[in-house]
Amino acid sequence: MTDLTKLTIAEARKGLAAKDFTAAELTGAYLTAIEAGNPALNAYVAVTADQATEMAKASDEKLGKGEAGLLEGIPVGIKDLFGTKGVHTQAASHILNGFKPEYESTVTSNLWRDGAVMLGKLNMDEFAMGSSNETSYYGPVINPFRADGSNANLVPGGSSGGSASAVAAWLCAGATATDTGGSIRQPAALTGTVGIKPTYGRCSRWGVVAFASSLDQAGPIARSVEDAALMMTSMSGFDPKDSTSVDMPVPDFAAAVERGVKGLTIGVPREYRMDGMPAEIEKLWQEGLEWLKAEGATVQDISLPHTKYALPAYYIVAPAEASSNLARYDGVKYGLRVSGKDITDMYELTRAAGFGREVKRRIMIGTYVLSAGYYDAYYVRAQKVRTLIKRDFEDVFNGGVDAILTPATPSAAFGIGDEDMANDPVKMYLNDIFTVTVNMAGLPGIAVPAGKDSKGLPLGLQLIGKPFDEETLFAAARVIEKSAGGDFAPRRWW
């Protein structure tokens, strides 16, 4: 029998339907892979083997009766930001030590409704703050890719590094992830996987630990465009418990994958051609445009003039919302508590011990920009810039452009503990240079593997779409996936 963990979700669904193997066998193969590989990769912070076995058994019964859901029997990993009833949910932070919620997030509820099987909770940057998955209380996640001729460990990107690493290393068939400024697309690009950040409001945020509420959006990371479309169909949908959830029907995203790009206009923003951009990123971008043109798309130069302000505005808005959201973690009701001489002392000691360095940095930035003397100078101005960024995209889309193609990241994966990044937070923040605009404007964006750098490491391209037009993104991403045609699987070393 083929190694079951190497099957895509689409292939596994066919195999289960044809009774080539059972959901229990598929789940067992993944649990064995996790046991063997997770000590080296650190992608999972909790493995729910017993629960997975029970869920797989229930799926086999449904498959036997012909009552299979969309993802019946498909084993998935869940980012530690999603509330899972009775199961470890700590946002990879010490401050939520021992927390197991009494509720289930809407996104995971949707997956279980459709028959998906939970393998466990995936590592991430603490409270989703990071671009390398090095800020987790549980230690860094390791990228399954290594540079040619090197044994050095590389970052998988962040904050959804555990999701990307687990999918790339065959430790789950697909994974949930979240994207506040690039946290789905950047790790997908660095691990040769596909990641889509849906339009803001497409997936419910209810039961997901909040970072920056006006930017956060859940989405899938998977091994192929079709797999990402299948997962997103299940994860999406209106939720009255989330006031930002949009009440509109969920399309069959997988049906749009092979639609092609004939007749589409693809925009190329001149502002994304940055000074010092590596030649291989520029070359890959050009190749992507040629692939889309070869399939019948028209390419058009466009301008998004406020792009240069996106990163600084993002790093005001996101920390401001984070400082407000994270005020609730005080040691009183749940999680870590460090005793003090009085309640104020207990708050201070708990937060000092419970939050990591990057989270503290962002809380302090956020508290500063929201403080009385600086609110207008920073936060209000950043929100005005955000409106201008959104308007740039609206002008382009109203002008006949169907989707926009850009690089996904400014480079391939870098080393764990990279001194330049560690000593200069701004350099780390620049990893989000191509992705934050999408969150600021609430648009959908997909990262798809498109090539490799000179050291054999994966590089991705990003497609940005109109609000709630993820179908066009899946169709265009599939063209790139087919045209790139490369093998984006890591060489096994773990």
Image (cartoon, rainbow, N blue to C red):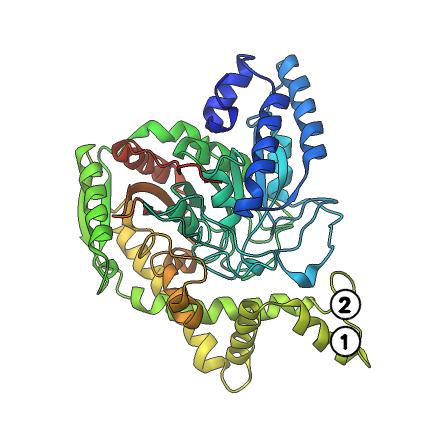
**Badge number at residue 337:** 2
Q: Is residue 312 left or right of residue 80?
A: left
Q: Give residue 293's position: percent from left, percent from top.
A: 18, 37
Residue 117 x %, y %: 62, 32
Give the residue at x 53% y 80%: 368
Q: Secondary structure at mark 2?
A: loop
Residue 442 location (% of width, % of height): 43, 55
Above or below, comparing residue 35 to residue 141 in the picture: above
State the residue in front, 168 or 106: 168
Which residue has dot 1 on it? Answer: 346
Quarter of the image for residue 224 reads: top left
Q: Are marks 1 and 2 in contact (CB under 8 Å)?
A: yes
Q: Earlier in the sequence, mark 1 or mark 2?
A: 2
Viewer-proximal residue, 149 or 106?
149
| Mark 2 surroundings: few (<14), some (14-19) or many (≥20) residues within 10 A | many
Q: Residue at x 36, y 49 (%)?
A: 150
Q: Residue furthest bottom?
A: 373
Residue type of the residue flagged with mark 2: Arg
Please state the horizontal and vertical placement of residue 262, each as a whole percent of the image.
Answer: 23, 32
SS of the residue under disc 1: helix
Residue for point 76% across, 48% down: 102
* Picture quadrant where residue 488 is located: top left
What amino acid does circle 1 point to? Met
Marks 1 and 2 sit apart, C-alpha to C-alpha, by: 7 Å
Q: Total label count?
A: 2
Q: Quadrant of residue 411?
A: bottom left
Q: Is residue 133 left or right of residue 435?
A: right
Q: Which mark is residue 117?
A: none
Neighbour class for label 1 at 10 Å: few (<14), some, many (≥20)? some
